[in-house]
Image (spheres, rainbow, N blue to C red):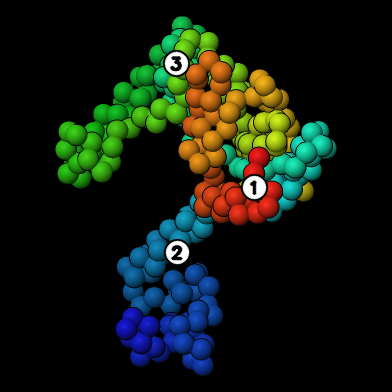
Amino acid sequence: MVRQERNRRGPEPGGNPAEARHLAAGPDELVARAPTEARGRAARKIFDHQAHLEGGTEKVLVRAGFRERVEELMRGQWREPVLVLRLGDDAPGYDVPGRRMDGTVKGENLIRRFFWNTLRGVGGAVFAVFAFVNGAGSGGGKWGKPFQREIRVTGPANAMALDLLDKLRPAKGPWLVLSPSCLAVVDTGPTYLDPAGVPPPRIVWQAREPEAPEVDLRTRFLTWPDGSKFRFTLHGRGEEQHLRKYHESPEGSF
């Protein structure tokens, strides 16, 4: 029904009359053709918002070439088949004695923490007012709580998992690499850039059996002998699909 209604409207402004709904003019020209100044401003906001969304999409994109570079590096290191997955960029929360929620060591960087806590308090107050105005109420509602992290790192004091997590935190483009006997994290830098113009991938952490943690790809948990755990996330639907293809392939057994 929607498509038929659009067809009855004919071509869009600036389009080709022989090709309904096809925009032949660019955003600037369409804004200039607006019948009133107010409509022109509204059209400009719409086009600017669309450009912003497209820019955000570009930033979450894992461009072709990065995975292949990591696969080549680690196959050469381990001489084994590998599975390479782009990890998510969302920072995990910690529930480990001696560590703050963000994973930093308690008692260190006190001056920096003072300014961060001050900023967080101001930001939280602004957020609370915004949530109240939008009907979120005191319970958080659909807006949740600002500056809150999901707990995905657990374990005892000096947990074995911290060796990986401390090296993972500064990575700009982290990849988890698995083989039948090894595990590694490799940093390629931001994956929305052209891979031809960035430095070679860099191994930031690796372990071999029996020191390597157990990996459960179904639950996304890495578990160390001391019981510490890290639940990792993947960088979007593309990585989910890559993992699914691996499970369906003849190699999907290690």
Nearest to the observer: residue 44 or residue 184: 184
The residue pinned by badge 1 equals 252
Q: Secondary structure at mark 3?
A: loop
Task: Report whether residue 40 is seen.
Answer: yes
Q: CA distance from mark 1 to mark 2?
A: 45 Å
User: In the visual, does 171 lie left or right of 196?
Assistant: left
Indicate the position of residue 169 as horizontal and vertical percent values: 57, 26
The residue pinned by badge 2 equals 47
Q: Secondary structure at mark 2?
A: helix
Based on the displayed image, in which of its 4 quarters is residue 120 positioned? top left
Based on the displayed image, in which of its 4 quarters is residue 202 positioned? top right
> Quadrant of the image for the C terminus?
top right
Q: CA distance from mark 2 to mark 3?
A: 46 Å
**For the point 79% across and 43% down, which residue is it?**
72
Image marks 3 and 1: residues in contact by CB distance under 8 Å: no
**For the point 54% across and 35% down, which residue is it?**
216
Res. 166 mark: none
Image marks 2 and 3: residues in contact by CB distance under 8 Å: no
The residue pinned by badge 3 equals 96
Image marks 1 and 2: residues in contact by CB distance under 8 Å: no
Rendered position, 184 above or below 252: above
**Label 2 vs label 3, nearer the camera:** 3
